Amino acid sequence: LGLKAEKPNRIFKGWETMSEKLFFDLPYQSYYATDFGLSAPTANLEFKFDGDKTFFLHERLYKPMNKMQGSLSDEFASLNTVKSKENIADSGNELNKAEGQKLKNSGYNIIFAQKGHGSINAGIETMQKCKIIYTETSVNLEDEYENCSWKVYQGIQMDVPEDNQKDHLLDCARMGISWYVKTRYLSI
């Protein structure tokens, strides 16, 4: 029938799609989230929240920094990234901190994500409690969403995401949604 088989250990399920036009017509505030990558993709998404439990996601960038013609700041400028909007950025290593600081120095409102023991699983749990709708043009996000899965060890599903999977945009979503929920004191 041409239907795809679903991985039994998938982390996320039940997300919906919407048109890009509908996303941009939504009357909610926009925010950004960024996951840095030198040879892996640097990912950036825009997200909105409806005031209840629904987050709307739109993929904006999915390109390694070593494939960019100029700086990441130049790339953001070409995407018409609004400098004043909050942009939640990965702070997991020195490259991330350095690239985030370069963006700050260029005038972008970079907020480093809070990391720590258990933050990945806590972010996943928060996302699983939300309704998530993403744009149909977010093809890399859709691929990550469909393939992101829990590690299986000797036939037992663990509460740990698989290693080395593509999850750059999902990291953006996790960081952005976690930040939003914490800073707005939402109980989701």
Image (cartoon, grey):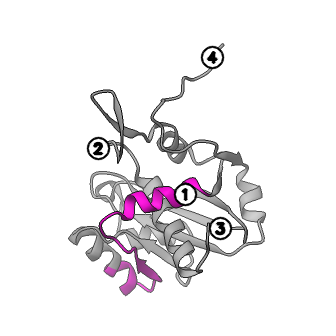
The mark nearer the N terminus, 2 or 3, is 3
Q: Could you give the CA–CA distance between mark 2 and mark 3, rounded to whole angstroms?
A: 29 Å
Q: Could you give the CA–CA distance between mark 4 and mark 3, rounded to whole angstroms?
A: 33 Å
> Which disc number belongs to residue 163?
2
Three-letter amino acid code at the position of disc 2: Asp
Q: Residues within 10 Å of mark 1 (few under 14, many from 20)?
A: many
Badge count: 4
**Which residue in the structure is indicated by mark 1?**
127
- Please state which of the two labelled residues, at mark 4 or mark 2, is closer to the viewer: 2
Q: From which residue to which does the magenta span run?
A: 101-129
Three-letter amino acid code at the position of disc 3: Lys
Can you say which quadrant of the picture contains the C terminus? bottom right
The mark nearer the N terminus, 1 or 2, is 1
The mark nearer the N terminus, 4 or 2, is 4
> Which disc number belongs to residue 48?
3
Q: Which residue is located at x 35 percent, y 66 percent?
A: 70
Q: Secondary structure at mark 3?
A: strand
**Which residue in the structure is indicated by mark 4?**
2
Question: Where, by quadrant of the figure, is residue 120 drawn?
Answer: bottom left
Q: Is residue 112 magenta?
A: yes
Q: Secondary structure at mark 2?
A: loop
